[in-house]
Image (tube, helix red, strand yellow):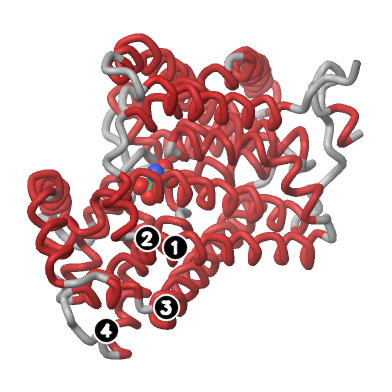
């Protein structure tokens, strides 16, 4: 019998998780049971993924860049990557602004619902605002300083410092290119094998993916707020989702135009990573799987994927920036404010920067939204309005963040002549589909 493709197994896991939670919450003990006995397995699954993120970045970047053999190739790839990332983010924010200005979801919120939402979510919103302020109280070049670690062990001990680990790995790899081949070979071979071990660990973790997403979605449904809140914010949520769908259509068209690869090829290759992004709400946790899928199923060569993807996971968050634009204008509309064209242009700039600064973890986009609101003169307290639906929207925007990184990696690879044939392992579930 033909084996079921990985994305189907994950989808089935997700569906069963939702169904199980809907059934269990009918019983009085259901929610506690899920929180005590199911949720921990979801957490363990995410921890396993995060566990390998730092070693993976170190090994694959050092191997990938040192294979380039020539620093000018690195600067060419670096320039194109950052340029394309900024461009796609600007497109994302513009799509978000267009949708929210046409649909005007803020007009669907009446005075009473607004006060209700503000009151019930004030405490949670205040904590996000406080988190944002602690980030804001620094000089204009703080972001640059933050990229350069003063201690690699300290940097590698916190998943939020991904950019610092990337900096170290690139710096190390440049050193490796510059020393004689005879001396560099053992180090390269070490990282090469190290990288293979990590990839094998990803395979092992992915065996548990259907069960991991089952646990994640079951606990999410069991702990979700009431349906009435979702209804009040339905129009706003719809705008975010519509914008995100348009963004995915944009990626698919870009991949088609620049690489001539069909949407089916692209989506089949990347879908397990998308589903994991949806289930975990973390681009960082999804990164190991994104890298594996892009290399083995989309044909991007390691030199490119190992550079473009970790950087993308940390700075390229198109879904997040789109959401920030929609959310900011929605809050302004709900408060009866009219935003001028100039202010909306300002939102394009701040949402682009805010998404670059957002950590690749759940809920980070909402913290940085505070900065977008402050710059546009929109009341920060408005965060309480959108709090209730943030988690499901986080799941959707993280999926788009990961899709964006994957599509850009294909385009950069193509432009550098590094887009080859997919090379799935023979025992891979999707081997037949991409052979
Ligand atoms: N959860 C998102 C990510 O990891 C960031 C955010 O928008 O909150 O990509």
Answer yes or no: do the residues labelled 3 and 1 have beta carbons within 8 Å?
Answer: yes
Mark 2, other Cα within 10 Å: few <14 / some 14–19 / many ≥20: some
Quadrant that contains the C terminus = top right
* 2 vs 4, front mark: 2
- Mark 3–mark 1 Cα distance, whole angstroms, equals 10 Å
Quarter of the figure with residue 234: bottom left
Quarter of the figure with residue 93: bottom left
* 1 vs 4, front mark: 1
Q: Is residue 263 above or below residue 45?
A: below
Answer yes or no: do the residues labelled 2 and 1 have beta carbons within 8 Å?
Answer: yes
Q: Which residue is mark 1?
A: 238
Mark 4, other Cα within 10 Å: few <14 / some 14–19 / many ≥20: some
Q: In the rendered image, is residue 238 in sight?
A: yes
- Mark 2–mark 1 Cα distance, whole angstroms, equals 6 Å
- Mark 2–mark 3 Cα distance, whole angstroms, equals 12 Å
**N-term mark: 4 or 3:** 3
Q: Which residue is mark 4?
A: 343
User: x, y (%) of residue 65?
Assistant: 62, 38
Mark 3 C-beta to ligand 1 under 8 Å = no
Mark 1, other Cα within 10 Å: few <14 / some 14–19 / many ≥20: some
Instruction: Return the residue found at the far bottom.
Output: 341
Mark 3, other Cα within 10 Å: few <14 / some 14–19 / many ≥20: some
**N-term mark: 2 or 3:** 3
On screen, residue 434 versus residue 285, left or right, reads right
Q: Which residue is mark 2?
A: 234
- Mark 1–mark 4 Cα distance, whole angstroms, equals 23 Å
Q: Secondary structure under badge 4?
A: helix
Q: Which residue is mark 3?
A: 103
Quadrant that contains the N terminus = top right
Front residue (pair 263, 133): 263
Q: Is residue 382 above or below residue 283?
A: below
- Mark 4–mark 3 Cα distance, whole angstroms, equals 19 Å
């Amino acid at each position: 019998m033909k084996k079921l493709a990985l994305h189907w197994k994950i989808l089935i896991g997700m569906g069963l998780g939702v169904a199980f939670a809907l059934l269990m919450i009918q019983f009085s003990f259901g929610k506690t049971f899920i929180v005590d006995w199911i949720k921990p397995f979801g957490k363990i699954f995410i921890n396993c993924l995060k566990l390998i993120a730092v070693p993976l970045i170190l090994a694959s970047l050092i191997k990938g860049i040192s294979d380039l053999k020539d620093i000018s190739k690195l600067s060419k790839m670096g320039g194109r990557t950052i340029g394309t990332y900024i461009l796609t983010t600007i497109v994302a924010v513009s799509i978000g602004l267009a949708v929210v200005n046409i649909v005007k979801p803020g007009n669907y919120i009446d005075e009473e619902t607004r006060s209700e939402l503000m009151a019930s979510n004030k405490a949670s919103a205040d904590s996000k605002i406080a988190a944002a302020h602690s980030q804001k109280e620094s000089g204009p070049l703080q972001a640059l300083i933050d990229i350069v670690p003063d201690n690699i062990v300290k940097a590698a001990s916190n998943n939020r410092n991904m950019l610092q680990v990337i900096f170290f790995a690139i710096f190390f790899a440049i050193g490796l290119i510059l020393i004689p081949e005879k001396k560099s070979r053992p180090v390269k071979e070490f990282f090469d094998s190290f990288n293979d071990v990590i990839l094998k660990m990803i395979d092992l973790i992915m065996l548990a993916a259907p069960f991991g997403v089952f646990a994640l979605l079951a606990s999410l449904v069991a702990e979700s707020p009431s349906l009435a809140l979702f209804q009040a914010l339905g129009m706003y949520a719809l705008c975010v989702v519509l914008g995100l769908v348009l963004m995915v259509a944009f990626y698919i068209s870009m991949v088609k135009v620049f690489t001539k690869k069909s949407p089916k090829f692209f989506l089949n290759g990347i879908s397990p990573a998308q589903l994991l992004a949806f289930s975990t709400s973390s681009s960082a946790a999804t990164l190991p799987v994104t890298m594996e899928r892009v290399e083995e199923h989309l044909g991007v060569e390691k030199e490119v994927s190992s550079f473009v993807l970790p950087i993308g996971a940390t700075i390229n968050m198109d879904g997040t920036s789109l959401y920030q634009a929609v959310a900011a204008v929605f809050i302004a509309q709900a408060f009866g404010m009219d935003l001028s064209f100039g202010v909306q242009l300002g939102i394009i700039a701040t949402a682009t920067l805010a998404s670059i600064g957002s950590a690749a973890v759940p809920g980070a986009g909402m913290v940085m939204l505070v900065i977008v609101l402050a710059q546009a003169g929109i009341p920060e307290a408005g965060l309480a309005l959108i709090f209730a639906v943030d988690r499901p929207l986080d799941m959707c925007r993280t999926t788009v963040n990961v899709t964006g990184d994957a599509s850009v990696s294909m385009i950069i690879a193509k432009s550098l002549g590094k887009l080859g044939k997919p090379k799935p392992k023979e025992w891979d579930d999707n081997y037949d589909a991409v052979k």
